[in-house]
């Protein structure tokens, strides 16, 4: 049960951070 909660929380965190990480990656790639 605990593992399921941790996996769910991790998935939610990844989905939530993805839109924030993508623009940063694009900017760094554009600069480089």
Image: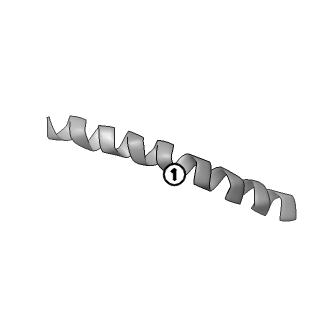
Q: Quadrant of the C terminus?
A: bottom right
The residue located at (78%, 60%) in the rendering is 27
Looking at the image, residue 30 lies above or below residue 7: below
The residue located at (31%, 38%) in the rendering is 8
Residue 26, quarter of picture: bottom right
Element type at mark 1: helix
Residue 24 position within the rendered picture, expressed as x and y whole percent measured from the top left: 69, 59
Q: Decide if residue 19 is on the left or right side of residue 10.
A: right
Looking at the image, residue 28 lies above or below residue 10: below
Q: Quadrant of the N terminus?
A: top left
Report the colour scheme: one colour
Q: Residue furthest left?
A: 1
Q: Is residue 19 visible?
A: yes
Residue 7 position within the rendered picture, expressed as x and y whole percent measured from the top left: 30, 39
Residue 2 position within the rendered picture, expressed as x and y whole percent measured from the top left: 16, 41
Name the residue carrying label 1.
17
Q: Decide if residue 14 is on the left or right side of residue 29.
A: left
The residue located at (60%, 48%) in the rendering is 19
Q: Residues within 10 Å of mark 1 (few under 14, many from 20)?
A: few
Looking at the image, residue 14 lies above or below residue 32: above
Looking at the image, residue 15 lies above or below residue 29: above
Q: Is residue 32 visible?
A: no
The residue located at (32%, 44%) in the rendering is 9
Counting labels gives 1
């Amino acid at each position: 049960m605990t593992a399921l909660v941790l996996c769910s929380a991790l998935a939610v965190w990844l989905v939530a951070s993805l839109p924030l990480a993508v623009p940063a990656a694009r900017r760094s790639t554009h600069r480089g």
